[in-house]
Structure formats: C-alpha cells, structure tokens
Image (tube, grey):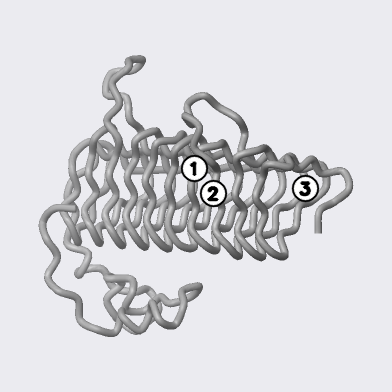
Amino acid sequence: MIHPSASVSPQAILGANVSIGAFTIVHENVHIGDNTVIDSFCEIGYPSPLAEGLPLVIGADSRIRSHSILYAGSTFGARFITGHRVTVREKTTAGLNFQLGTLSDIQGDCSIGDYVRFHSNVHIGKMSKVGNFVWIFPYVVLTNDPHPPSDVLLGCEIGDYAAVATMSVVLPGVKVGSGALVAAHSMVGRDVAPDTVAGGSPSKYICDTSKIKLKDGTDRPAYPWTSHFRRGYPADVVAGWDIPPSPRSESL
C-alpha cells in the first residue's frame, strides 16, 4: 500500500489500509486514519515551528490528491477530501467530510466545521472561522488584515449553511450570518445578517433569501438550500433537514 518511491517517517502513525502514492513524503508527527488514500507527489506533515509541536492528524477514509501539501499542526475529521495542489498551513482544524478544491489554500489558524465545501482556487486567510455546511465557491477570498501590511489579524466568520458565491472578497472581521448568501463578484465590507442576500461592490442588503426562487420551473424557494439539495450528504444528516428548523439567532 506504500509505493517504493514514497518516503514515510518511521515515527509516522498509519492506520489500517492506508495507501501512499509515488514520491510522496510523510514526515514524523503525522497520524493518518484507516483506509486513507494519499496520491503521488504529496508532502504530509510539512515541518514548521508555527505548528508548535502539534501533529498533523488526518481522519479515517480520507482522500488526498496529488501535489497537496499539508503542514504539521492541523487536524482533519473523517472523510477529508482534497483536489490537486492544495496547501493547508498550521493549526487548521476541520470537522467531518471537509472538501477542499483544487489549487485552494488555507493560511492556518483556521476553524472549519462539518460538511464544508470549498470549490477550486479558494483562499482562506489566517484566523478565519467557517461554520457547518458552508459553501464557498471558486476564487473567493477571505481576508484578515484591515490595513495591509500589518500585524493586525481580524479573521472573517462565515455562519452555518451560508454560501459565498464565486469571485467574492470578504474583508477582515466581517461576519456572514447563518443561512446567508453573498452574491457573485461582491466585496463584503460589513456584516451580513442571517438568511439575507448581500451583493455588490461594496456589498449591500438585496433581499431576504426566502424571496429567491429556484430557476427550475417549479417556483420553489431556493433557500434554505437544504430543502432541495441533498447530493453528497449522508442519509442520517439529510433526515434532520426535513424537520422544521428553530428560528435562527441574529448572530452567528
């Protein structure tokens, strides 16, 4: 299961049925869960003093695609999936079934919830906080420096079930509320209330998400998206989406 050209530290801890591809490097202080597949030309547990001695932990049943670099000090839950050529820096914590698209990078010290989906070419600045079931689409940037360059870091916060559409920029310290939608090509410089749509540059309130209809001829509400979109989620998770949710708070 380990290619002859791979370099795996004897101090690394590998679970059962782990597969390591050609020319991949697995450093010491790495824990890889059962049934995980790591493709060729990856670097797993890249050493860094910013990790402060913490291990890289990859949950069971994960899939790391070629040319990905995962630094020491991060933790990923079960069924972590990457595209190709992703980079994740130190002290990132992600929950179950995090999917990170090709050419995306996470700059470290980030918190990411369960069942989060990042598409390709996404940049996540240090100190970002992303909730559960969040969608972040291609070329989105979460920033963190309010007056660059400086040593001040104000991470963005994205609430549960929110979606940030393609080529949007969320500015330092901004909070996008639960169930909110950031429209494509937006520059978000102020907080977005839960279950609302914000768009434009600079962004502004457009409408409540409940006003948006699916463009499939049914005239059904598009939001909350959990009412009609189930692909890729376990049956036990989507079963809970059929229960009417409690009223959401006005904060994250």
* Residue behind mark 1: 74
Q: Residue at x 60, y 59 (%)?
A: 33
The amino acid at mark 1 is Ser
- Which of marks 1 and 3 precedes in the sequence? 3
What secondary structure is found at the residue carrying circle 1?
loop
* Image quarter of the N terminus: bottom right
CA separation, marks 3 and 1? 20 Å
* Residue behind mark 2: 57
* Residue behind mark 3: 40
Residue 7 x/y as whole percent: 79, 40
What secondary structure is found at the residue carrying circle 3?
loop
In the image, residue 252 sits, relative to residue 217, either above or below, namely: above
Q: Residue at x 39, y 50 (%)?
A: 112
- From the viewer's perspective, tell me whether residue 168 is left or right of residue 73: left
- From the viewer's perspective, tell me whether residue 205 is left or right of residue 213: left
The label on residue 125 is none
Residue 154 x/y as whole percent: 27, 30
In the image, residue 205 sits, relative to residue 153, either above or below, namely: below
Query: How many circles with numbers are drawn on the protein?
Result: 3
- From the viewer's perspective, tell me whether residue 156 is left or right of residue 46: left
Q: Can you tell which quarter of the image residue 48 is in?
A: top right
CA separation, marks 1 and 2? 6 Å
Q: Can you tell which quarter of the image residue 80 is in?
A: bottom right
